[in-house]
Amino acid sequence: MLKKLFATGFAALAGIMLLVPASEARTLDEIIKAGVIRVGVQPNLPGNSVLKPDGSWEGMDIEMGWAIAKSLGVKAEFVPSKSPQRVPILVSDQADIMLG
């Protein structure tokens, strides 16, 4: 009974996945050519990432984003990404990576 339930659920999930349009992430070459990497971070996660009232960012994830950008020779652009929005933001190509 349980195997049949899992098989049915898996078949339904596979069918749904076929209907979801594939998204194209930017390649590393495209990121370098653009000169910016878009980094998704939580806007209010003290210690990791905080968007301050003056519009600047601070936190461990921000430092990591800057380090990644520096190693690629590009600038970091931080994209506020609350937890429920993280995957949709990646899939819709609003961010290149997520930190958190």
Image: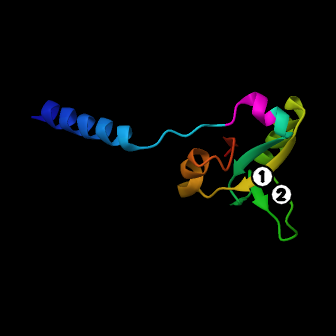
Q: Residue at x 53, y 56 (%)?
A: 84
Q: Residue at x 76, y 33 (%)?
A: 30
The residue segment tinted magenta is 26-31
When the figure is inspected, residue 23 is found, relative to residue 80, above or below; the finding is above
Residue type, label 1: Phe
Q: Please tell me how crowded label 1 is: few (under 14), some (14-19), or many (20+) other residues with Cα within 10 Å.
A: many
Image side of residue 5 versus residue 63, left or right: left
Dot 2 corresponds to which residue?
A: 57
Indicate whether residue 28 is drawn in magenta: yes
Could you tell me what secondary structure mostly forms the magenta stretch?
Answer: helix
Q: Position of residue 38 (x, y in %)?
A: 75, 46
Disc 1 vs disc 2: which is toward the camera? 1
Dot 1 corresponds to which residue?
A: 78
Q: Secondary structure at mark 1?
A: strand
Q: Position of residue 34 (x, y in %)?
A: 83, 39
* Mark earlier in primary sequence (1, 2): 2
Q: Residue at x 81, y 50 (%)?
A: 77
Circles 1, 2 touching at the beta carbon (< 8 Å): yes
Tell me the quarter of the image containing the N terminus. top left
Residues 77 and 50: in front is 77
Image side of residue 5 versus residue 33, left or right: left
Residues 78 and 91: in front is 91
